[in-house]
Image: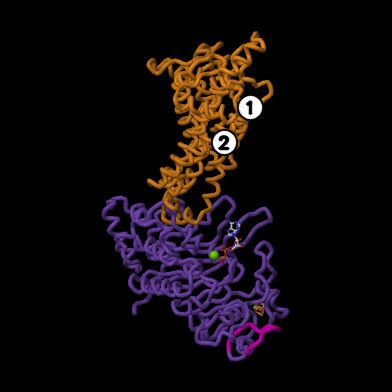
Chain colours: A purple, B orange
Amino acid sequence: MTAPETLLQVEDLRVSFATEEGVVRAVDGITFTVQAGEVLAIVGESGSGKSVSVMTLMGLTRGQNARFEGKAMFDGRDLIAASDAELRKVRGAAIAMVFQDPMSSLDPVYRIGAQIIEQIRVHEPKVSKAQALDRAVDLMERVGIPRARDRVRSYPHEFSGGMRQRVMIAMALANSPKLLIADEPTTALAVPIQAQILDELRRLRDQTGAGIILVTHDLGVVADIADRIAVMYAGRIVEQGTLEDLFYDPQHPYTWGLLGSITRVDRNRAGKLPAIPGQPPSLLAPPEGCHFRPRCPHAFDRCTELPELVSRLPEAPEHPDRCWLEPERKRTLRQVGDQIGLATGETVIS
Amino acid sequence: MARFVIRRLLAAVGVLIAISVVTFLIFQAIPNGDPAQRIGGRTANAAELALIRHEWGFDKPIYVQYIKTMGKILSGTVVSYSQNLNVLDQIRQGLPATLSLAIGAGIIWLGLGILFGVITAVRAGRFADRALTVLAFIGVSSPPFFLGALAIYYVGYKANIIPLGGYSSLSHPWSWFKHLIAPWLVLSVLFIGIYSRVLRSTILDIQHEDYVRTARAKGLSERQVMVRHILRNSLIPIISLWGLDFAQVIGGGAILTESVFNLHGVGQFAAQSIQRLDVPPVLVITMLTAFFVVLLGALVDVIYAFLDPRIRLSG
Ligand SMILES: Nc1ncnc2c1ncn2[C@@H]1O[C@H](COP(=O)(O)OP(=O)(O)O)[C@@H](O)[C@H]1O
Ligand code: SF4
Ligand SMILES: [Mg+2]
């Protein structure tokens, strides 16, 4: 294998919104890269700043009350500093996005075909409508929509949620993006459909060599598809590593909590641990030091100091985390019964 | 489609019957509404009034009177009590003025309502929005007789740019235009105020829809996002408002505007007939308005189904 090409390099990205209650620090200094042909999963509870992070890459969070710091280098250009006009050329072309709710993400008044054609022609105005229609049919077939030739004439409300999400993916692929961002693409879908959509994304990565950022609140979703995972909590990345790193040697108590609350098919349901107790902190006034401190059963005095995102494992320099605990201690603490989890008083293992 | 048409026709008949009954009963209940008095005039004595009552059938039970009147309306022979003129002829004479007023004003208020609605939504919170918002409130709260009087006095009498009132037939287009431009604008002001506010708030809502975010993520320009996605979806409620308001005006609903500009339209005729407590013209005009409302309502539903594919024509 040749050395992978770095598609996207995000450095210390910060996004804050001025609101009536104060400044919301939605993204508080995140750094990550995406290589061509890899799937980076960004995982965290809802409200941790995942959507803001990825939408900012496309300029979709720009507005009067938003402030940005840091860089996001893509194709030799900083997406954060780029003008609106420059970004417009990137959107839906080199970077495409699939959103969470397929029921509301398509315009109800236009036919499916017209919406895909619009995506093709906005970046390639020379393509005729007839040619664009043929391409739309091809795209729909590629993402597994049966009878695509007829169904280009359907309206979104005539499609099921899963089929609409396929349309969104077809649209995202229309201009062969180098980077595909999928923000909770399966969250609104029934479980069997979720698996199909994930299959589709995996196939695309294999066929096109595009990089994919897959955003989800459910670690279970990424188990079969992610190459690397970044765990986000309250605007920060608290742990980052390969799929194996995160599933078999997780370093951050928050990651343990996420792992513990996955419903695993290979396990008796009764073995599922409860979701992490408590709520994520307010992003208006987050706690000092480690953001997870108020919910962390293992917190100690040092945790009022902010832990840097660095590797504390000599054997895995590419697996950084933000937790003060000693790696040896973590290995003991994260073991709850026969699985990894966040020990709490109420945890019952059957 | 056929089902839709049939159901709407049946509904129209139902509405017309209901409206005519209610109108008829209201006039029975009005004190001092004795039609014999209208016909006989002030000088008629008791014997003459009794004779009139008998001749016109006012001594019959109400339902008989109603059926007789409706029969005359349907056969086109109904006459007004106060002038003894054929009502349908009088309405026919008023119709060109009323249609001219309605069509011209309807186009103006729809166009300007959309234009101002878009401007205020796009510039929400900024100067243009605030200025137009103030104007809209002034517009909504200025009665047509006031605006009409101002226009006639300043633009007509003082500046001598427009005539002081009246209607001029379309066979002299320039004169027709000069007679109608002020009524069009005066009648439109209220609707422009309402429509621009409704459209502004609809646009501000729809701006946050997921499919608008999708449109931006596609790389469309702000203008394309606005026209193709936001505006296209926001127009749906405006169109239904327009259908009903337009039907009102066509059916003689612009009573104040027609009267202040002395257009001799259906609305002005309605106003005069109400003053004289003259049942037949009021009845016919009310039914006419109701008819247009039902007709335009059906038309709006067809346009609706065309604009919003989620909606099916079902009657
Ligand atoms: N335009 C905005 N103005 C103010 N706050 C915002 C805005 N957009 C997002 N936020 C806040 O940023 C935080 C992170 O949101 P989000 O990125 O959507 O979380 P996630 O996708 O991880 O569920 C939330 O607390 C949300 O309320
Ligand atoms: S730094 Fe402290 S509070 Fe934060 S996760 Fe580690 S132990 Fe818990
Ligand atoms: Mg989100």
Left-right relation of A105 to B130 = left
Which chain's residue wears label 2?
Answer: B
The span shown in magenta is A339-350
Q: Which residue is mark 1?
A: B28
On what subunit does the disc labeled 1 rest?
Answer: B
The answer to whether B150 appears left or right of A116 in the picture is: right
**What is the secondary structure assignment of the residue under circle 1?**
helix
At label 1, the amino acid type is: Gln
Q: CA distance from mark 1 to mark 2?
A: 36 Å
Q: Residue at x 59, y 25 (%)?
A: B60
- Residue A280 lies in magenta, yes or no? no
| Residue B59 image position (x, y, % from top left) | 61, 23
Residue occupying the point 61% across, 21% down? B277
Residue beneath disc 2: B194
Tell me if residue A14 comes above or below residue A126 in the rendering.
below
Q: Position of residue A51 (x, y in %)?
A: 53, 64
Give the residue displayed 64% in from the left and 80% down from the top: A324
Residue B246 spot, x, y in % from top left: 49, 32
The lab-note entry on whether marks 1 and 2 share a chain reads: yes
